[in-house]
Amino acid sequence: MRTVSSLLFLVACGTDYQITAEVQELIVSPQLSDVGLIPVGEVATITLDLASPLGAVTVLTADILTVGGDVFSFVEDELPVVPAGGVAELTLEYAPSTAGYHWAEVTLYTDEGEGNQHVVTVRGEADVAAGRIWPELIDFGPVQPETTAQQPITLVNEGRVPLSLSSIAFDNDTFFLAEAMPAEIAPGESLSLTLQASVADLSEQVGIGVTEGTLSLSLDVRANACSTASGDLYDSDGDGFGFCAGDCDDFTDTVSPGTAEVCDDLDNNCDGTIDEGTECYDDDGDGFSENDGDCADGDVEISPESVEDMANGIDDDCDGVVDDGTFDGDGDGYTTTGGDCDYTDDSIFPGAPELPDGKDNDCDGVIDEGTDTYDDDGDGYTEDDGDCDDSDASTYPGSIESADWQDNDCDGTVDEGTDNYDDDGDGYTETGGDCDDADASVSPGEVEVDGDGIDNDCSGEGT
């Protein structure tokens, strides 16, 4: 709307009248600009329209009188010239550095002569962005190479202004988001995201993710992290051996240190060799396993392709017939000359699998070794007695549990009562930063409660 101020003088003098008028040419709009609520640290713009219907007007100077700090400023250094019958724009910025209401009077001085001052009002409100990321620590546990593990995270807007999220930047490219950015979270709302981890090998990976946008929040992430791992978290298959305690396949419960090797193409005992000691493994390296017909897989001189020695008392070529002039009383392919320590029992011969039968099946002078009835590690317990790792003398029923990611006492739980175990079930151990593992409401992932005198988030500072 054009603004016109007129002063009318009427002088009675006979029939003569005199009329004078003063016209204000420049029109500035809007008279009140309100940018609304924005986050502290962000910038909002205000555009003033300058119109001059009657003639060209030059803005000579402009002042901003601010209440509540210098938060308003002109964008352009050069002030506009408004052409006759045309419109020009003048842009201001609202850039609050503190929370609160702010307003200012903007005065434009022009070359119009009298009436060359034009005043408009601008205002806005700013508030500090507030939010949190949950949980603040993500432990993926064991992550296998060439796989991608996933964990959910949530960002919550706890303030009055929108949260703009351009990305979450990680200092370790093992960790990344599944979703595309950017995103915006309205006040009182939350945003669910999927955090992913992909590793090239089984080395320990740790990192920090920081939100980029309106608010900076940090997230601790880890994978294959034995230095701060939880015993139960890092025993994914529940076989009593954690990834951090030498379980070479923590996703298969038939694979762990000390497990009996079976013919399944897996390294069951985690010694680096697959199927050794089984019928499908060539134990003596002669090119034949028991499944291939090797009747003495502990002797490289005996195989289906060996030449029969007719005078050594051994079935050299594994055809089931012992050389002439010797005696194989039990028909197991071995004679006393060939090392059979009991020619009356066909389950006893050199290289026979040891059985839990009280006999020296393999004729090595030791009875039942390697079976469930033999105390292989000398700790006084066999597998039949409940020893869950008969290759480790520190592991047996009643042993003291240690923080070593192993089930030392064979009760089915790893590291209970130690710093590696989550005693209160809040997802954090003492090793993982829980400053009170007897209280599920206290952990690095909790939100600090003001005034309760407890260090809820284990930051070292209780309020």
Image: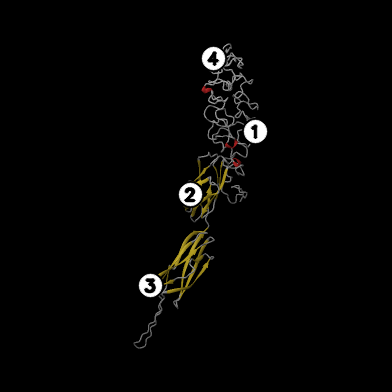
Q: Position of residue 402 (x, y in %)?
A: 64, 35
Are there few (<14), some (14-19), or many (20+) residues within 10 Å of tag 3?
few
Position of 101 relative to 371 (above/below): below
As measured in the structure, the alpha-carbon distance from the residue carrying label 2 to the one carrying label 1 is 45 Å
Sequence order check, earlier mark of 4 and 2:
2
Residue at coordinates 56% horizontally, 36% vertically from top-left? Answer: 235
As measured in the structure, the alpha-carbon distance from the residue carrying label 4 to the one carrying label 1 is 55 Å
Give the quarter of the image for residue 314. Answer: top right
* SS for callout 2: strand
Sequence order check, earlier mark of 1 and 3:
3
Q: Position of residue 222 (x, y in %)?
A: 56, 44
As measured in the structure, the alpha-carbon distance from the residue carrying label 1 to the one carrying label 3 is 94 Å
Are there few (<14), some (14-19), or many (20+) residues within 10 Å of tag 4?
some
Question: Which mark's residue is nearer the viewer, 1 or 3?
Answer: 3
Sequence order check, earlier mark of 2 and 1:
2
Q: Which residue is mark 3?
A: 85
Residue 219 in view, yes or no: no
Q: What's the image's color scheme?
A: secondary structure
- The amino acid pointed to by label 2 is Leu
- The amino acid pointed to by label 3 is Gly
Q: Is residue 31 left or right of residue 284?
A: left
Q: Which residue is mark 4?
A: 321
As measured in the structure, the alpha-carbon distance from the residue carrying label 4 to the one carrying label 2 is 77 Å
- Find out whether the residues at labels 4 and 2 contact each other: C-beta distance under 8 Å: no
Q: Which residue is mark 2?
A: 191
Position of 52 relative to 204 (above/below): below
Residue 37 in view, yes or no: yes
